[in-house]
Image (cartoon, helix red, strand yellow):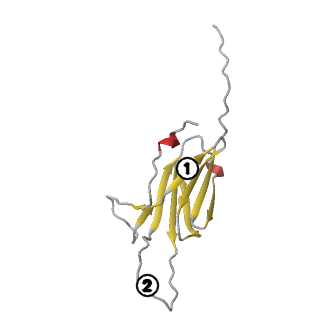
Amino acid sequence: MATQTQDIQARDKHELKSTSEQTTPGRIFSPSVDIFENDQALTIVADMPGVQSDDVTIDLREDVLTLTGVPSVSVPSEEEFILEEFDTGKYFRQFTLSEVIDQANIKANLNHGVLRVTLPKVGPAKPRKVQITEG
């Protein structure tokens, strides 16, 4: 299946560096994603360890899908950090959606820090033969 999604390059979670000023404190990371496609839908799987479903926001505005998640790192009151190596911060990733996505029926599920967003297509692209007429 030759689609434009094959042009997407794999990458690891990395901190976003922005030339604009942040209005919220802390670090912002771009989560690693996998994108799958079949005749009915595109599926985005985003790695957001430590994020609970109440701390995920999926926003759709003007054909741009924005995924945001804030991990919950809690230390019991009777304990304190001795060593902290995990890079934590807010997750942020955006995708521009094409006209083939049925934006009214987007669904999402979060399971053990893995966010799965299903983007159904308006109608499956079915192969067909086009009849040619003379005249």
**Residue 5 image offset from top left, x and y in percent:** 52, 43
Q: Is residue 10 above or below residue 28?
A: above
Q: Say which element carries label 2.
A: loop
Q: Is residue 130 left or right of residue 72?
A: right
Q: Residue at x 53, y 47 (%)?
A: 63
Q: Residue at x 33, y 63 (%)?
A: 21
User: Amino acid type of disc 2?
Assistant: Phe
Furthest toward the bottom, the residue is 78
Q: Residue at x 51, y 62 (%)?
A: 68
Quadrant location of the C terminus in the rendered image: top right
**Residue 87 image offset from top left, x and y in percent:** 42, 70
Furthest toward the left, the residue is 19
Circle 1 sits on which residue? 35
**Residue 123 image offset from top left, x and y in percent:** 67, 39
Quadrant location of the N terminus in the rendered image: top right
Q: Foreground: 71 or 68?
A: 71
